[in-house]
Amino acid sequence: MQKSIDVYAYLRHEKKFPLIWCAGCGNGIILGSIIRAVDGLGLDKNLVSMVSGIGCSGRTSTYVDFNTLHTTHGRALAFATGVKFGRPELTTLVVMGDGDCLSIGGNHFIHAARRNIDMTAFIFNNNIYGMTGGQVSPTTPEGMIASTASYGNREPNFDACKLAVAAGASFVARGTTYEADSLDEIIALAIQNKGFSVVEVMTPCPTIYGRYNRLGNAVKMLRMQLEDTVTVEEAAGMSPEELKDKVVTGVFHDAPRPELCEEYELVIETALKK
Amino acid sequence: MLSKKTKVKYTEKKKKSKYPMVSFQIFDKWCKRCGICVDLCIHNVFMVDEDGYPRAVKPVECNVCGFCITRCPDFALRILERGEKNAQG
């Protein structure tokens, strides 16, 4: 084990604990990974800002001792763009759920990726709208049951990583909560990237998604992530039929390109010369 | 100087030391009894007590891989190395 770090130094554990999430929810594991990555990079917690939207994942910003902002549904990236433009020295982390990011805030997501502004967007993908009672979200796989699809969902689901690559994000990766150690490394790489980075994390929702689809308890759902996922290197040698029910994890895209805040510095310079 | 035989005995004895290298601190107020730490530990360090909370019954077996603390969703588990003081939960 690497040197154990004091995660409690980054948490508001005296005021806000215990966490509001259900027993076995993976959101807490992701929060731990983010904290370990920030600690591993040696960032000052007063120079980190965390912006979150609405939903289960929206509570994340409440528990950490960074500069935090809990914003409106789907608009976390819009608020974060303002934070980054106002204070470019801050490391901006944006925490969103799958519905928050891809349906309500889908427009903000593709435009933040297009602008390539320096921030890290985390998508907590639990395949369902957990907080509002289990409605179908854009990432619910085909055939799965939700409260608004009692006979099975017939809509194809979004691949958030492919969407982000197509929209122009400069770093795109996917991780799972079971492999929390490699998730730390992925998050550290994403924060270091100068530009818009997207990290999609598959997280179990045993209370809503697990119960509707009879997937078992929290431990079983966590172990299932190991069986259902393949790495990018393994997926390269597999046929599309084999990959049909698998989730591919790893770093998909890492191609730095000009970042928006730096480009604006050039605009300010040329305007001042006149 | 130790002979080979005694050397082997000495290392064996050291491995099976009855004094654990670490101790565990479990915050019952934060724990939601999901059972992740109990199930994922490959050395079966934890057992569930009658209320469903995890208890470290075999801390000697722990090799401090950190699997349980990174997967605890509620930050309710802490590994304390020797000499480290208990933190307030």
Image (cartoon, coloured by chain):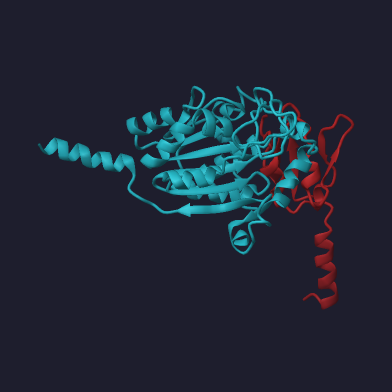
Foreground residue among A94 and B61: A94
x and y percentages locating residue A256 in the rendered image: 39, 52
| Quadrant position of residue B39 | top right
Give the mark count. 0
Residue nearer the viewer, A119 or B12: A119
User: Quadrant of the image for the C terminus of chain A?
Assistant: top left
Residue A114 vs residue A185: left or right? left
- Tell me, what hue is chain A? cyan
Residue A72 lies, in percent from the top left, at 49, 22
Q: Residue at x 82, y 38 (%)?
A: B55
Q: Where is residue A216, by image quadrant?
A: top right
Q: Position of residue A129 (x, y in %)?
A: 64, 28
In the image: residue B25, left or right of residue A76: right
Residue A163's place in the image compared with A105, above or below, is below
Q: Among all residues in the image, which is located at the extreme left?
A: A274
**Snapshot quadrant of residue A138:** top right
Chain B is which colour? red
Give x and y (percent) for residue A103.
Answer: 53, 31
Residue that protrudes farthest toward the right in the picture: B50
Residue B21 visible here: yes
Q: Which residue does the image show at 25% across and 40% down from the upper left?
A: A265
Front residue of A105/B36: it is: A105
Mark yes or no: residue A117 visible.
Answer: no
* Front residue of A184 and A81: A81
